[in-house]
Image (cartoon, rainbow, N blue to C red):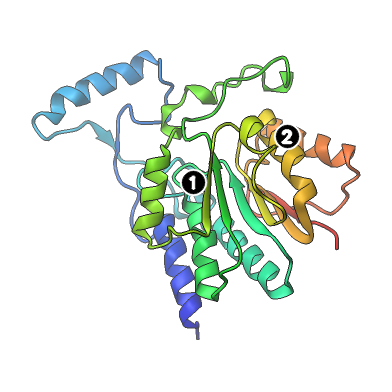
Amino acid sequence: MQTPDELYIDLLKKTLTFSLWPEPPVPLGIFGRRKHSTRRKMAQGINRMLSARGLLLAEVPAYSAEQRAGGEVWPGYADTMAGLHRLNNVEQCVRQVVADGVPGDFIETGVWRGGTCILMRGVLKALGVSDRRVFVADSFEGLPQPEMDRYPQDKGDALYDYDFLAVSEETVRGNFERYGLLDDQVVFLKGFFADTLPDAPIDQLAIMRLDGDMYSSTMDALNNLYHKLSPGGFCIIDDYALPVCAQAVEDFRKEHGIDEPLEPIDNFAKFWRKAA
């Protein structure tokens, strides 16, 4: 039988992923297409005209339950793209570091609507932990354009051109408030990682979860945060299935002699535990 805190966390995960309900119809032109796409602009124009009559052109996505659980879709209503499998991993990591007394705060770099950070804060609250902070690091303006002088590995990356990925800080704060989890244990770091992470007010980390998609975002997070990760802490890579993200991880691990095994979470993400 589940304990009250387990019931709460289970419901929180299902709510954050919107998995209690079918994926809603998607208005044409909302996401999955680039800002400057002609088809996208046409669809948006038609929907603007139809909206005056209370109508929209939309399509019903044919996503399977496993695709949704594996975080393989860009969801319409969910507060996270991570899916249940990756949220289960986050819960397990939080419980482990608390049980083992691994010192440090938690951070996610790249938060979208904030769902994974909301889960971190929710698990801490359910466990009665009041001495750890959750850092919410994001530009809140979408992804940066590739910096070819610093990281030529990102050549051709166009994720900065997707406005669906840009969620304001105000919206993310509002999402924390809706779950009753916005308090002084939640710290927002607004800006691109190269600017915010070097001087972030973080002494120790027990969990670092990287969701920056790009080589640059992944490497900036690893370079500025990994030395603060306590032995026994977890480094979670949400975007390992993306070749440039995987390359950044492998380059960093090789440069720093990190040989702890990378363990798969689902078809996309991997993590490792820093040696004690």
Q: Quadrant of the C terminus?
A: bottom right
Comparing 29 with 201, the one in front is: 201
From this viewpoint, which residue is outermost toward the bottom? Answer: 1
Q: Residue at 39% of width from left, 31% of height from top?
A: 31
Q: Report the amino acid beneath label 1.
A: Met
Mark 2–mark 1 Cα distance, whole angstroms, equals 21 Å
**SS for dot 1:** loop
From this viewpoint, which residue is outermost toward the right? Answer: 257
Q: Residue at 56% of width from left, 25% of height from top?
A: 144
Q: Nearer the viewer, mark 2 or mark 1?
A: 2
Comparing 276 with 22, the one in front is: 276
> Can you see residue 159?
yes
Counting from the top left corner in percent of width and height, residue 115 is at: 47, 52
- Circles 2 and 1 in contact, beta carbons < 8 Å: no
Task: Place residue 254 in its image quadrant.
Answer: top right
**Going from the N terminus, do you reach mark 2 or mark 1 first?**
1
Q: Which residue is mark 1?
A: 81
Q: Is residue 86 above or below residue 241?
A: below
Q: Is residue 6 above or below residue 258?
A: below
- Position of 65 compared to 231: left or right? left
Task: Place residue 36 in its image quadrant.
Answer: top left
**SS for dot 2:** helix
From this viewpoint, which residue is outermost toward the left? Answer: 53
| Mark 2 neighbour class, 10 Å CA radius: few under 14, some 14 to 19, many 20 or more | many
Counting from the top left corner in percent of width and height, residue 192 is at: 58, 31
Q: Residue at 64% of width from left, 47% of height from top?
A: 201
> Can you see residue 214?
no
Q: Residue at 38% of width from left, 63% of height from top?
A: 180
Q: Which mark is residue 251?
A: none
| Mark 1 neighbour class, 10 Å CA radius: few under 14, some 14 to 19, many 20 or more | many
Q: Which mark is residue 219?
A: 2
Q: Report the amino acid beneath label 2.
A: Met
